[in-house]
Image: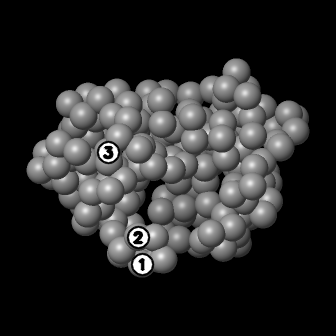
Amino acid sequence: MHRQQLLTALAHYRTFFLEEEAMVERTRRFILEHEDCFDRKLWPGHVTASAWVVNPARDRVLMLHHKKLDMWLQPGGHADGDPDVLNVVLKETSEETGLAPEHIRLVSDRIFDVDVHVVHESAHDPRHLHFDIRFLVEVDDRIPIPGNDESHEVLWVPLNRVLSFNNLRSIYRMVQKTRRLRGCRQP
């Protein structure tokens, strides 16, 4: 998936969440305005990619406790100039979980979620935005997850406990979408 393909995917993406709909439009405009939108040195922001990793039963989510950010998140990261966000999401999932690529299955090449969020200023970077494109990924939860040195811990979290690890609105959306996949009733 490249810049034009991503724009097309965003144009066809539908969500039940009004705030996400606004973020989809904001992301689409950003990509149209910045040919170098995948470059992490682009300010005021850049495109990133994340994986919402579920087990085959869709009742557990793989989360990692990010050392630098000190919070529980889904795997993902910078595109580093790579316009193929599907490639980025699979690479980042493998790197951040320590799993071999053959253990990671992209459920669909359709976008699962879109989020625009602020990354606060650090010693290395000014305050900027991440235009995060998220995809649904499946991993067998019986396989040991080695993790890597970017996380304190990588852990399978029961779907009904995910929000106790991270209650950001974007995590809430992905939990709700996963419940819909499972055919569960909304709480």
* Residue kind at label 2, given as amino acid type: Asp
User: How many discs mark residues in the rendered view?
Assistant: 3
- SS class, disc 3: loop
| Residue 121 numbered tag | 1
In the shown orientation, is residue 142 left or right of residue 8? right
Q: Which of marks 2 and 3 precedes in the sequence?
A: 3
- Between the C-alphas of marks 2 and 1, the distance is 6 Å
Determine if residue 91 is in view.
yes
Residue, x 19% and y 53% (percent of image)? Answer: 30
Q: Quadrant of the C terminus?
A: bottom right
- 128 relative to 34, above or below: below
Comparing 161 with 79, the one in front is 79
Residue, x 32% and y 48% (percent of image)? Answer: 39
| Residue 138 numbered tag | none
- 101 relative to 49, above or below: above
Quarter of the image for residue 58 reads: top right
**Crowd class of label 2 (few under 14; some 14 to 19; many from 20; radius 10 Å):** few
**Crowd class of label 3 (few under 14; some 14 to 19; many from 20; radius 10 Å):** many
Which residue is identified by label 2?
125
Q: Quadrant of the N terminus?
A: top left
Q: Position of residue 156 (x, y in %)?
A: 79, 51
In the shown orientation, is residue 159 left or right of residue 50? right
**Crowd class of label 1 (few under 14; some 14 to 19; many from 20; radius 10 Å):** few
Which residue is identified by label 3?
38
- SS class, disc 2: loop
Residue, x 45% and y 31% (percent of image)? Answer: 86
Residues at circles 2 and 1 in contact by the CB criterion of under 8 Å: yes
